[in-house]
Amino acid sequence: MKSGDKNFDGIGSHFQNKIYRSPKGKIRLRVLEEDFRETLPELSSQPSAILDAGCGLGQFSLQLAKEGHNLWMSDISEEMLNAARERFGNSGVEATFIHSSIQELPNHLQFDLILNHAVLEWTENPREIISTLYALLATGGAISLMFYNIHGIRLRNLVRGNLRKVKSNRFGGDSGSLTPSNPLDPADVISWIEDLGLTILSHSGVRTFYDLMDANPRNKIPLNDIVEQELAIRKVEPYRSMGRYIHLLCRK
């Protein structure tokens, strides 16, 4: 673990209320579900060994565990890991829980699928994280990377009139904030992926317009209608590149 990597001990409950109990979190999960359904249909036919690296509360992983896959859950936050363990236990499904940074995961492990969702932007050296996960991925396996997009947060600040912040080009959140410390340029991440020889199977924007909507109409429109449009344009440029997050599914 690097000194600049974020540990969510002490703010896990705030994270859960702010993110996954909100429409933002629900949209995020739906985009992930559709990307997996379209791109990795083999997951529905055979059990896989899956690592959720930086698992947080494990919402998406829990769905995969319920489908019969073997889950390994790792996080540097003991609080988040315990919350994920409780969530799995309450749902009657099992998983292996590892209290560890990604850099310190046992290097003899090999996985058919690795999840790394909303983690890279909280780390000091995201390229190193991707390389570490690549080494844990079996040949023919897939890796799912979802990360905070600097173009999306720049656009959000432009729309809100925060021009001073845009000019400074500093979009990281303050200490204790749930705004990531290291928003990433998708072009950089794609370059790192290609340097490793990974093939990109799917490339989506997550929340391409929801975060830009005025609160009044946004709160009146049924969430299902918003999700329908988010799914419809998530892979269409230029909307994809403006997503608050980017989701890449890649094959080794």
Image (tube, rainbow, N blue to C red):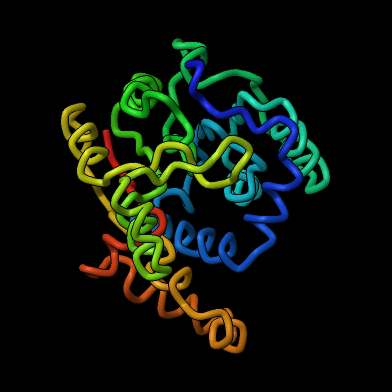
Q: Is residue 51 above or below residue 41?
A: above
In the rendered structure, the answer to whether residue 32 lies left or right of residue 11 reads left
Is 252 on the left or on the right of 22, as rendered? left
Q: Number of numbered discs present?
A: 0
Give the answer, above or below, for where 160 lies relative to 47.
Answer: below
- Report the quarter where the C terminus lies: top left
Q: Kindly give the residue lying farthest to the right in the view shown.
A: 90
As rendered, which of 11 and 133 lies closer to the eye?
11
Q: Quadrant of residue 126?
A: top left
Identify the residue at the far front of this view.
164
Residue 38 visible (yes or no): no
Q: Residue at x 59, y 64 (%)?
A: 26
Question: Can residue 45 be seen by looking at this rendering?
Answer: yes
**Image position, residue 150 (x, y; %):** 33, 49
Residue 54's image quarter? top right
Image side of residue 240 versus residue 170, left or right: left
Residue nearer the viewer, 248 or 148: 148
The answer to whether residue 22 is left or right of residue 241 is: right
Residue 110 location in percent, x, y? Answer: 43, 21
Please give the name of the residue rendered at 54% of the width and 40% of the height, measured from the top-left corner.
174
Residue 248 percent location from the top left of the image: 33, 48
**Residue at (29, 51) in percent of width and height:** 167
Instruction: Decide: is 51 above or below 67.
Output: above
Asked which quadrant contains residue 221, the reply is bottom right
Q: Observer-nearest residue: 174 or 85?
A: 174
Q: Residue at x 47, y 37 (%)?
A: 181
Does 107 appear above or below 231? Answer: above
Residue 122 position in % (x across, y down): 48, 34
